[in-house]
Image (cartoon, rainbow, N blue to C red):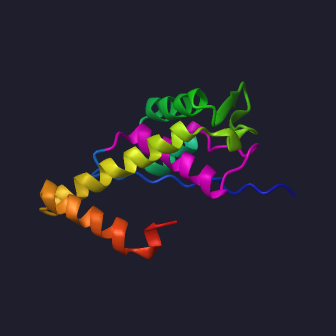
Amino acid sequence: MEDKRPSIYFRLDSRSGVAPYRQLVDQVRHAVKLGQLRGGDQLPSVRDVVTQVTINPNTVHRAYRELEHLGIAEGRLGLGTFITHDVDSLSRESDHDVVEESLKQWIKLARRSGLDEDQMLTLLRQFLHHNEQVRS
């Protein structure tokens, strides 16, 4: 019997400052990198995503088109959207994009927490030089 569990559960953070479509794209990219989504896995239908996170269907379509553009997913007429079989070939450039987006979010959080630029740089230097967890 085929497993009908959703391949991914989306969540949106309206306070993040990141566009909803981008949050969906980033969540799929992250799930692929962690191996939670693999080539051939089907993404939830647009209708399912709309119900799951109360979002405009056009936003989900935009996210899925972006995933297709990135080579992470492919739409199959009448069947849905699937993770491509060559997701292992995600480029270093896309890794750079993920790091850049994470850094943007960290900066926004740091600013909301009251840190100025010098304090952020000091904190970053401390982690780079003194924290074993971030060296690998």
Q: Image quadrant for the N terminus? A: bottom right
In-front residue for pair 82/90: 90
Residue lying at the far right in this picture: please name it. Answer: 1
Residue 55 seen? no
Q: Position of residue 13 (x, y in %)?
A: 35, 53
Question: In the image, 113: left or right of 24?
Answer: left
Residue 86 located left or right of residue 109: right
When the figure is inspected, residue 53 is found, relative to residue 97, above or below; the finding is below
The residue at 44%/67% (across/down) is 134
Q: Nearer the viewer, residue 121 or 41?
A: 121
The verdict on residue 92 being magenta is no
User: Residue, x 33% and y 43% (percent of image)?
Assistant: 18
Asked if residue 23 is among those painted magenta in the image, a careful observer would answer yes
As drawn, 81 above or below 104: above
Q: Is the residue 106 above or below the residue 19 in the image?
A: below
User: Residue 70 location in percent, x, y?
Assistant: 57, 31
Disc tally is: 0
Q: Quadrant of residue 71?
A: top right
- Return the x and y of residue 37 as percentages of the image width and height: 67, 51
Residue at 69% across / 57% down in the picture?
A: 5
* Residue range of the region highlighted in magenta in the rendering: 18-46
70 left or right of 5 in image: left
Query: Residue at (74%, 54%) from the top-left corner?
Result: 4
- From this viewpoint, is residue 19 visible? yes
Q: Residue furthest front?
A: 129
| Residue 135 image offset from top left, x and y in percent | 47, 67
